[in-house]
Image: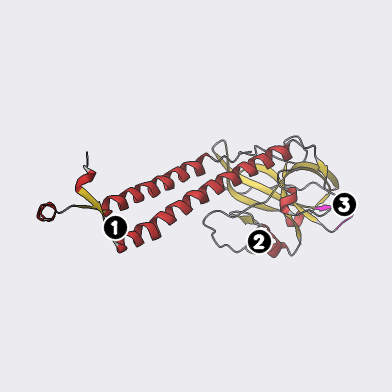
Amino acid sequence: MINLSTFQFQPTLINSLLILGIMLPLFLSLGFWQIDRAQQKRTLANTMESRRKLPPAVLDRPLSAGEAAFRSFIAQGEFIADGQVLIANRKHLGKNGFHVITPLRIDNSNRILLVNRGWVAAERNRPPVVETPTGRVTLTGEATTPSPPAIELEFDTHQSNIWPYLTLPNYRAWSGRETLPFILLLSPDSAHGFVRAWEQARPGPGMHLGYAVQWFAFAFVSLMFWLRLSLRRRDSNAEVGS
């Protein structure tokens, strides 16, 4: 054990600025940021759960992506065959395939809703021929907003209707059509779809709380390190001489 009577507290300016002025505030701010992220995940999870319990609503008015997210809707209209795109490299039970994205012109409006009709298997690593239903259809599904992957690769949407991923800005630029700010994941019990095994992951705060504990631990260690550096052993000869 350290005998504190043989030490005196003499912090240096450089150590204090580096540890107390930079490292400690940084670690604490990162810890509190992770706590805030955990709370955001709790709020999102509660929103998802409450909205998914609501009965399907008729999609008869414009909605923002935030208003529509995780809600089930009933949409009526006609598919637009020439606006269909396939999203490549989608997996189902280990098999490679495509997600079929078909635009729906909603009844009595100019609004266009993109509908993910589900997964179809590749045919000898080639895209299958996917027919588009004609006439008026009634669909049910959950609203969501597609996002690009973490590493967004550039691709020419005008070269083909087979894309590596879907974003609404890309689709609008390719089709020249203004779409609603979300898409519809077609319900498994709705007609005109394919394989629909949609993931319904519930975001949890656990990961962020773990990171928060880690950053607070770093803050504690840095504080202890500063205290240890600030302790100087007393000069025993000077004490005897005095």
Q: Is residue 207 above or below residue 111?
A: above
Query: What label sits on residue 107 in the rendered view?
Result: 3
Q: Secondary structure at mark 3?
A: loop
Magenta segment range?
105-109
Disc 2 to disc 3, how far (Cα)? 24 Å
Task: Measuring from the top left, give residue 130's x and y in whole percent.
Answer: 70, 47
Q: Look at 74% across and 57% down and name the residue there.
A: 83
Say which amino acid is labelled 2: Asn
Q: Is residue 222 above or below residue 203?
A: below
Task: Measuring from the top left, give residue 194's x and y in whole percent.
Answer: 70, 40
Which residue bears the numbered disc 1? 11
Occupied quadrant, residue 16: bottom left
Task: Measuring from the top left, give residue 22's x and y in whole percent.
Answer: 39, 60
- The quadrant in which the N terminus is found is top left
Local crowd size for mark 3, using a 10 Å CA cut-off: few (<14), some (14–19), many (≥20): some
Say which amino acid is labelled 1: Pro
Which residue bears the numbered disc 2? 170
- In primary-sequence order, the first of circles 3 and 1 is 1
* In-front residue for pair 200/29: 29
Q: Secondary structure at mark 2?
A: helix
* In-front residue for pair 184/240: 240
- In primary-sequence order, the first of circles 1 and 2 is 1
Task: Kindly tell me whether residue 215 is visible in this rendering.
Answer: yes
Local crowd size for mark 2, using a 10 Å CA cut-off: few (<14), some (14–19), many (≥20): some
Predominant SS along the magenta part: loop
Is residue 22 covered in magenta?
no
- In primary-sequence order, the first of circles 2 and 3 is 3
Q: Look at 62% across and 53% down and name the residue there.
A: 147
Task: Measuring from the top left, give residue 204's x and y in whole percent.
Answer: 57, 39
